[in-house]
Amino acid sequence: MPGETHKDTVNPAGWFGPNLRALSSVCAGGMVVLIAISALSLDTGAFATLEDRGLRLIAFAALTVWLSLGLGLHRRGVAAISVLAFASFLELFVHPIRGEAVGTLPAANLGIVLAWCSLQVYAWRAEKTAPEV
């Protein structure tokens, strides 16, 4: 019809449609996993330096935030415990087998705890500012 507009037929999400959220989550998760792998693949030699500890702190904090947002903000505790188990497994089994320096577990734990605390504050703030129904 001549009076019709095409606004009703255009999908505002583009060609990704409803899968845009899933695609962005997969891309972000891929980046986080690659950062964690690159942090673990560094050869620390006999001693772990401050740079190694800082990189592991950031990598495991990012992994905790990504897993928390992937599982749901209400499951942030489960995500933090899962990442902690992964970090402990790496530190206690994988690093000694590779002959690398141990001692980066406190840095990984600090990153996990900082991410969890930040998520706690974020969830509290989101709950406080949520509109009442």
Image (cartoon, helix red, strand yellow):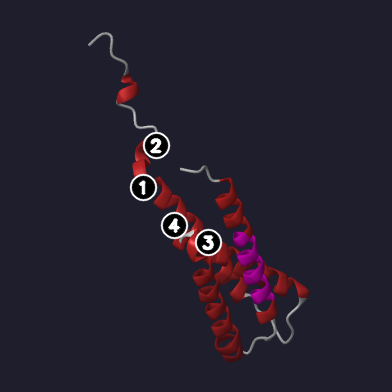
* Helix, strand or loop for disc 4: helix
- Per the rendered image, the range of residues in magenta is 107-120
Question: In the image, what residue type sits under mark 4?
Answer: Val
Residue marked by disc 2? 13
Question: In the image, what residue type sits under mark 2?
Answer: Ala
The answer to whether mark 1 and mark 4 are in CB contact below 8 A is no
> Would you call the spot at circle 4 few (<14 residues within 10 Å), some (14-19), or many (20 or more)?
few
Q: Residue 26 shows which numbered tag?
A: 4
Percent coordinates x, y for residue 46 in the rendering:
72, 87
Percent coordinates x, y for residue 6 in the rendering:
32, 20
Question: In the image, what residue type sits under mark 3?
Answer: Trp
Which residue is drawn at the image coordinates 52% and 42% (left, top)?
A: 131
State the image quarter where residue 2 is shown: top left
**Disc on the earlier residue, 1 or 4:** 1
Q: CA distance from mark 3 to mark 1?
A: 18 Å
Residue marked by disc 3? 66
User: Looking at this view, is 71 or 37 the one in front?
Assistant: 71
